[in-house]
Image: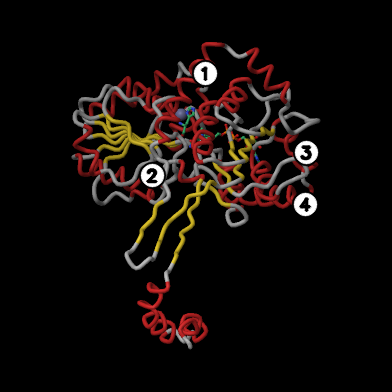
Amino acid sequence: MIKTIKYSKDVDLEKELARSQFSYDDVNETVESILKDVKARGDKALIEYTEKFDGVKLENLEVTEEEIQKAFDTIDKDLMEVIQYSHDNIKKFHEKQVRNDFLIRQENGVVLGQVVNPIEKVGLYVPGGTAAYPSTVLMNAVPAKIAGCKEIVMVTPPTKDGTILPSLLVAAKISGIDRIFKVGGSQSIAALSYGTETIPKVYKIGGPGNIYVAMAKKMVYGEVSIDMIAGPSEVLIIADESADPVHTAADLLSQAEHDKLAACILVTTSEKLANEVSRELEKQLKELPREEIARTSIETQGRIVIVDNMDDAVFVSNYVAPEHLELAVENPFELLPRIKNAGSIFMGHNTPEPIGDYLAGPNHTLPTSGTAKFSSPLSVDDFVKKSSFIYYSKQGLEEVKDKVIKFAENEGLTAHARSVSKRFEK
Ligand SMILES: NC(=O)c1ccc[n+]([C@@H]2O[C@H](COP(=O)([O-])OP(=O)(O)OC[C@H]3O[C@@H](n4cnc5c(N)ncnc54)[C@H](O)[C@@H]3O)[C@@H](O)[C@H]2O)c1
Ligand SMILES: N[C@H](CO)Cc1c[nH]c[nH+]1
Ligand SMILES: [Zn+2]
């Protein structure tokens, strides 16, 4: 049964919405020791952890060309069309994000500018523990490809028979991934961070994963860059009395089935809707093949929050800063400007969250665990870096020389001042 809370200003949201069913300390220790071990023992450690966590002893870590060809030969052709359709929508949306170089020319001959360069080597994590995510392959790889990254490698856990599903391989090839490795979890994050005999060290790691993956990315940050902490899925639905309880429950469960640690929250002004959704969740849970995962998520992390008005609903939502926010209200566009913290916003009654998961175009790798307060969806920006450049003419330098010298002397940095003044000595 999902827990229901009546919100008022006295309610301690930190306590009521706490995601406390898991010991992060245990995960920390496990991940730290895996990272150290892979750094020390490379491929040998990867093979052992893959046997331990994924139940398969691998001979080779890299997917071969024959395996990729076989995937194209065996994949369901309708699924391949859907993958291509989704790829094209994601590409169209992300092409709009491309940043161009710019130049500022001044009359005195000074030229200033910014050049944008792709990050050369990137590693993409595609989850594969309890479900396979070809959609995540596309969401990660397409922006990297548009950015122009030279080497795009993908890591994902293998199935029990030591293969990678055809849908993942086909999605990887369609979106331009160069190399694919059959390794998942924190061990794969270690491999991408430090490099092993087989897996190249990259400059940046992107992609979502479970708590072990998220923790590993956090720990290797500094050694490499990371996109964000995209962990267990979340959805928060703001609903008024116009929302349909059957649809609302279905939307909550769409994210609950990802992970026992997924967080699904309904915030509503309607007590009637709250009761109906609570009943409907019980009914629909029984119909799901992944009932156990979804039930644990709903019963431990799930909440229905009843509020007096939309102001309070918006306040709670901005406080949670959910990965996905559904505005299941009469006029979602009216509410939109008041939403300050959310990964992706789904507007109105005909935009269920899975539309964004699969094919609308915007990215589905999104900030979780409240990090939407300061992070954005995965985008082309995550795969580029910028350099600025400065060109001064003789006249331009002469015009500012005294100012630079003044600044440098104030900071007590004589050599800085002299690097300018020396140019004007006779
Ligand atoms: N934010 C997004 O865009 C997005 C997209 C898709 C999925 N997700 C999330 O990704 C996650 C996928 O999780 P998953 O588990 O299915 O796949 P996963 O690939 O993230 O994790 C599986 C791996 O976790 C490791 N692991 C499992 N138990 C472990 C243990 N006890 N100790 C050490 N390592 C262990 C193993 O190496 C295993 O291969 C879910 O939380 C889902 O909500 C997020
Ligand atoms: N909802 C996930 C992000 O939290 C993305 C996804 C992929 N496939 C289905 N859903
Ligand atoms: Zn999803």
Q: Residue at x 58, y 34 (%)?
A: 126
Find the distance from the CA under tag 3 to the CA under tag 2: 38 Å
The mark lying in front, picked from 2 and 4, is 4
Mark on residue 40? 4
- Please tell me whether mark 1 sits on a helix, a strand or a loop: loop
Mark on residue 48? 3
| Residue kind at label 4, given as amino acid type | Ala
Asked if disc 2 is less than 8 Å from ligand 1, the answer is: no
Residue 47 at x, y = what percent?
A: 77, 37
Check disc 2: other Cα within 10 Å, few if <14, some if 14-19, many if 20+.
Answer: some
Q: Residue at x 62, y 35 (%)?
A: 154
Between 315 and 273, the one lying in front of the other is: 315
Check disc 1: other Cα within 10 Å, few if <14, some if 14-19, many if 20+.
Answer: few
| Residue kind at label 2, given as amino acid type | Leu
Rendered position, 353 above or below 15: above
Whether label 1 touches label 4, CB < 8 Å: no
Q: Residue at x 43, y 69 (%)?
A: 392
The number of numbered badges drawn on the structure is 4
Mark on residue 142? none
Whether label 1 touches label 3, CB < 8 Å: no
Check disc 4: other Cα within 10 Å, few if <14, some if 14-19, many if 20+.
Answer: few
- Please tell me whether mark 2 sits on a helix, a strand or a loop: loop
Between 396 and 263, the one lying in front of the other is: 396
Mark on residue 289? 1
